[in-house]
Image (tube, rainbow, N blue to C red):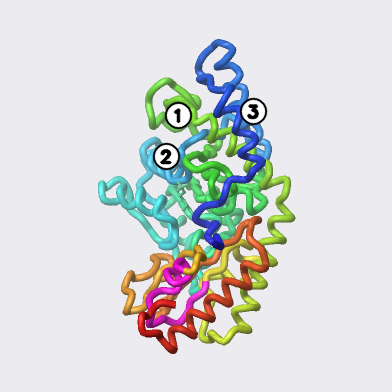
Amino acid sequence: EIYCDSAATTAIDPEVIETILPFLTTNFGNPSSSHWAGRKVKEAVDASRQKIAKLLNVMPQEIFFVSGATEGNNLALSESIREYGLRHAITSKIEHKAVLEPLLKHEREGDIEISYVKLDKKGNVDLEHLERLLAANPQSLVSLMHGNNEIGNLTDIQAISRLAKKYNAAFHTDTTQTIGKVQLNLAEYPVDFLVGSAHKFHGPKGVGFIYINKRHKLKPRILGGGQEDGQRGGTENVIGIVGLAKALEIAYRDFDLIHEHTLTLKRRLIAQLENSEIGNITYNGESASEHKSLSAILNVSFPCLHIGSIVNNLDQLGIAVSGGSACSNLGNGGSHVIRSINHEAEKENVRFSFSKFNTAEEVDHIVETIVKIYNADSTPSESGVL
Ligand code: PLP
């Protein structure tokens, strides 16, 4: 079996497992308890927060643990709209649903109006249009992601953060795909809110963090025992938090190695696809670019098959990738991201996303398998099964 869907989630790093094991056994206290059992665990939670803050070059008081990027995005967007009475949001059509859905809810309820910034055919933000939108609507909420989860596009959040500041707007950026994968020195960016999710960088699922710039004091969203500085009540996910901090530490420690490895795999995949007999393939967004996209993501449009989708055929052969399809015989409509940037009718887009655990042999095997699928498609067997 081959797992090539690391933008969806990643395997937990063995070093992370080793670090969290004591918190599954002996270190079981409640961090809010004042006795020895609680103190020991509270120290671990505090140390984790400090570790993350140091890696991102922010203050520990600016990091709040949550259940993941979905919750972090919801909290940042909804609470800033409520707290500051913001009436206008500027976002893009290729954001993750964890951003678009909360914004649309506020629009339906009459709290805000949404403007969508123009994107070019490759999904890049038109910064001049953004500035025009900001000039017409100062004091907006800007939410534009750092790395796109489907096409891998990297956004110039430094330029966006400066524009947001110029027009007194709050800037939220969904950094779920870039935390631990792109060097991010927050001292250099006036970002107001950003999020991270541990399972995207070899940590546990169901835990993440939100960074809230110290100039904000959002109202607590989950009321209870006052945990997380009153922002989010409820006993902390200690195992998750300790695992998150360790996973981020490893991501930063091995940063160059991992980046080089995933980029090498992406180059190899592109070269193999181009040399194969498949033909008529295109790359979506900037995913084939080495500098404008995440090294770990390649999104390819393939000609439609008669024998079902490539993603399903690969799955039946033990290869996990993801995608969407505008092929009429499949009819799932494809992805909102691809639809928003280029309307390539009758194509199936497949997202390949790598991690440090993938190998060159796996890339070769994936391309060989796709070629076999196309060959079977042109000469379907009786049963239609490969
Ligand atoms: N934002 C982006 C860009 C993502 O890729 C994801 C994960 O799919 C999320 C938000 C949501 O993350 P989680 O499911 O961990 O809450």
Cα gap from disc 1 to disc 2, whole angstroms: 10 Å
Gap between marks 3 and 2, in whole Å?
24 Å
Q: Residues within 10 Å of mark 2 (few under 14, many from 20)?
A: many
Q: Which residue is mark 3?
A: 47
Q: Position of residue 164 (x, y in %)?
A: 52, 51
Disc 3 vs disc 2: Cβ atoms closer than 8 Å?
no
Residue 338, given in percent of the width and then of the height, sits at: 43, 70
Q: Does the beta carbon at disc 1 come under 8 Å from ligand 1?
A: no
Range of residues picked out in magenta: 300-316
Q: Judging from the image, what secondary structure is the residue with disc 2 in?
A: helix
Callout 3: helix, strand or loop? helix
> Quadrant location of the C terminus?
bottom left
Q: Is residue 312 magenta?
A: yes
Q: Is residue 289 magenta?
A: no
Residue 133 lies, in percent from the top left, at: 44, 59
Q: Position of residue 105 (x, y in %)?
A: 30, 49
Left/right placement of residue 190 relative to residue 224 reads right
Q: Tell me the quarter of the picture where residue 40 sits.
A: top right
Is residue 115 shown left or right of residue 120? left
Residue at the disc numbered 1:
231
Quickly name the residue at label 2: 75
Disc 1 element: loop
Identify the residue at horizontal 48%, vertical 47% (top origin): 169
Q: Residue at x 50, y 59 (%)?
A: 149
- Residue positioned most to the front: 382
What kind of residue is marked 3?
A: Ala
Labels 1 and 2 touching (C-beta < 8 A)? yes
- Looking at the rendered structure, the kind of residue marked 2 is Leu
